[in-house]
Amino acid sequence: MNLFHNYRAQCAPNSSPSQLVIPETLKLMPVYMLSAMKTHAFRLLSNSRQLDSKLYWIQKFLSIPFGKVPYLFYPRMYCVTDILNAVGRQETGGEDQGDGQALDWGYFTDESGQTMAKPRILAGRLEKVTKQDAYVMDNGEYINLLIQSQVPDQFV
């Protein structure tokens, strides 16, 4: 509470007393705290949890750069099954083919002049995951490839 009181007194003295004034960077703090409480570093020890694992995760949190901490709690997720279609659209002028996704891609050219497509970042929610797609999930430490059950054979 002292944090919010000091922030109001120093940074927003003209705000209404009934209004909760917090910095933009602290708005997601409750979500990150709940995510942190679910990690191995902050869970209680039990028969299935080893002390070595808990100490490893505590050390990891203490040594990771601050900019990468959110990715441990909320990893980046990319859909990779439609990259070939996106590159084909970019090479044909990027016209919309009825799905509204012609302008959603970032294109890059490497040193050899080959066009590469950067996949769109998806929200890490179950509603965004379909059985017909493959996904890459990056949490800053590991990169996982998730191939769903109905992915086309030509992709695999």
Image: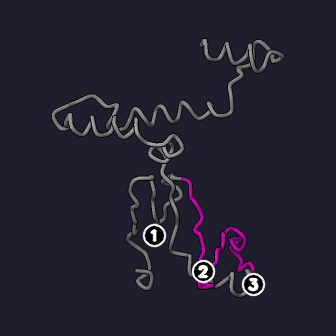
Dot 3 or dot 1, earlier in sequence: 3
Outermost residue toward the left in this view = 47
Which residue occupies the foreground of this view, 57 or 80? 57
Residue 62 marker: none
Split into 4 quadrants, where in the image is the N terminus?
top right
Residue at 56%, 31% in the rendered image: 29
| Element carrying mark 1 | strand
Measured Cα–Cα span from mark 3 to mark 1: 26 Å
Q: Against 86, is 73 above or below?
A: above
**How many C-alpha atoms fall within 10 Å of the one at disc 3: few (<14), some, or many (≥20)?**
few
Residue position marked by numbered label 2 in the rendering: 111
Give percent across and percent down for residue 39.
Answer: 36, 38
Nearer the observer: mark 2 or 3; the answer is 2
Dot 2 or dot 3, earlier in sequence: 3
Q: Is residue 144 left or right of residue 94?
A: left
Residue position marked by numbered label 1 in the rendering: 134
Give percent across and percent down for residue 25.
Answer: 64, 34
Q: Is residue 23 left or right of residue 112?
A: right
Residue at 60%, 80% in the rendered image: 111
| Element carrying mark 3 | loop
Pointers 1 and 2 in contact (C-beta within 8 Å): no
Give percent across and percent down for residue 30.
Answer: 54, 30
Residue 93 marker: 3
Examine the residues drawn in magenta and state their main secondary structure: loop
Write the start and end of the magenta stretch as one range.
95-123
The three-letter code of the residue at mark 3 reads Gly
Which residue occupies the foreground of this view, 101 or 117? 117
Q: Quadrant of residue 26?
A: top right
